[in-house]
Amino acid sequence: MAEHYAIAIDIGTSGIRAQSYNLTTHKTISTAITLRHPLPGANVVDHLHFALNIGLETAHNILITTINRVIANLNIDLNKVERLAVCGNPIQLSLFNNIEIRDLAFWGENALKEKNITPPSRRGKILNPQAIGLDINPDAKIYIPPAIKHEIGADALAMLYKSKALEKDEYSLIIDFGTNAEMALIADGEIYTASAAAGPAIEGQNIEKGRLASPGVICDINEEEMFWRMKILNDNLIVEDGDLIDPVNGNVIKKSDIQAKGITGTGVIAAFSLGSDDKIIKDGKIKDTIYLQDDVYLKEKDISNIGKALGAFRAGQLTLAESADILLDEIESVYMAGASGFYVDAKKSLNIGQIPPCPNQVYQIGNTSLAMAKDIVLNPELLDELQKLADKIKSNHIMLATSEIFEKIYSLELAIYEQGMPFWMYNQWLQKYGIQEIPNIKTEPEITKLYPRDISDLGDYDLNTVDIENTLSAKFDRCIYCMDCVNSCPENALSFEKDEFKLRTDLCSGLGCLRCAGNCKEHAFKYEEFYKDI
């Protein structure tokens, strides 16, 4: 019997994950991932700005080139692929689909009308590979699940669907622990959704020594013998014990055999939680430096950046509770989705306000976007069911960018991390605003990890991490080759070889940085030159 295959893809802000399946047995065959997104930038807003300023077609081509490279590493005959489903937020799916994206950059009908922008349909659809540019069987069907509304996309729908929270009669909160911090509150049969745009610090970016999850990064920290034990990912992305460190002065109490190269978002959360307990962090501030391992440390700016990200989570949750007219301590279950939500220590997230303070149950549910894409390719009729669910949710979407409640709460979060406002004063101001106070942690919830890893089943082959190195070249008139542009790049994304400048798009911080252009004394450096031939 001839074998036929299906592919599921999750396009995340920090990388792409793909799996292949046998359509006869429904077994997972293999999994391939990237550790970065191919477009320049640290977050989805950077990707949006890139598409707006450099060109949607260019962004689409870079993304699809990378996806083709990833699926080529799935250990199957791509000519026998019959179905492919892709999941992600509205920006990523718009880039994948090569459709109008400007409507995602503006809020309100007046702004869209003024700029003559007609939002495209983001309902569930079925396309062919040629329309996208995918190198698979030309007769295969491409399934794209629906968005809910504006910045709440198929990834948020996946959280609701895969958590099964809708099947329970209780107040539940589901959160995607990524840069967008999509969240959904289920209360009294209604679903309230929002996106808090926490930013890249939550995944270890915009942190001086921060990195995405990769070998050599500190991914967790535990208290041990009054000191801090580093937990570090090895070359196989398995957690090993690192050094035992005094975080106040950096003294090594016990040396390990593994070296630390940076710290990821879950590690920063751990440091923030332990630092708060040990009074190293007080009212959102540190005196000088928190020392970790092997020249990895956290400075006050890092604490401020992660604090603002945590503040977006808490302000978003409180805004949803106010909108649903319930108290935070009435939320019985919390579902933590995404890789960061799966691997972070849930007790530490609870300790610093990343999740509400009083749930009875906390579930760490992993990569729901990839899981839903898998369900679609194995049961294509699910696409219609998901559209009905998306239509039902639309009525209670809270646009935090225009919410007066969120604005007031988040201003108080900023006051903690920028001005050192004590938390008792935070609650006092909430009371003045007529907003419920943040309750204290009452009991320790039961914490359940549904799977051993964020992707529950890797298949018959080892996890394949695909190097997506995408290098572009450019030459500049009037360049005097002083190399100030190369030397100023914080990500080492820029180099000079054989009379040409080389740019690694997957390392580049994009239009939100542009130190290369800003440090060019001759004003010769033109960032867009790298993309003119794509």
Image: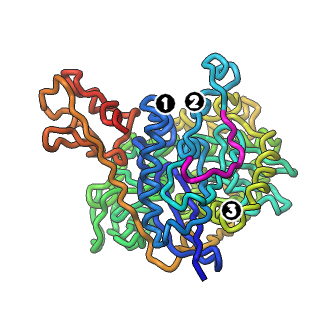
User: How far apart are the two marked residues, 3 and 2, measured between alpha carbons?
Assistant: 28 Å
Q: Residue furthest bottom?
A: 1
- For disc 3, the neighbor class at 10 Å (few under 14, some 14 to 19, many from 20) is many
Residue type at numbered disc 2:
Arg
| The image quarter in which residue 412 lies | top right
First of labels 1, 2 by sequence position: 1
Residue drawn at the location 64% of the way across and 42% of the way down: 195
> Does the segment drawn in magenta span residue 122?
yes
Q: In the image, is 195 to the left or to the right of 219?
A: right
List x then y, in percent, for residue 382: 75, 60
Task: Name the residue carrying label 2.
Answer: 102
Residue drawn at the location 56% of the way across and 53% of the way down: 129
First of labels 3, 2 by sequence position: 2
Q: Secondary structure at mark 2?
A: helix
Residue type at numbered disc 3:
Ile
List x then y, in percent, for residue 229: 39, 68
Task: Name the residue carrying label 1.
Answer: 52
Q: Are marks 3 and 1 in contact (CB under 8 Å)?
A: no
Q: Quadrant of the C terminus?
A: top left
The residue stretch that appears in magenta: 120-131
Q: Are marks 1 and 2 in contact (CB under 8 Å)?
A: yes
List x then y, in percent, for residue 271: 44, 56
> Does the segment drawn in magenta span residue 219?
no
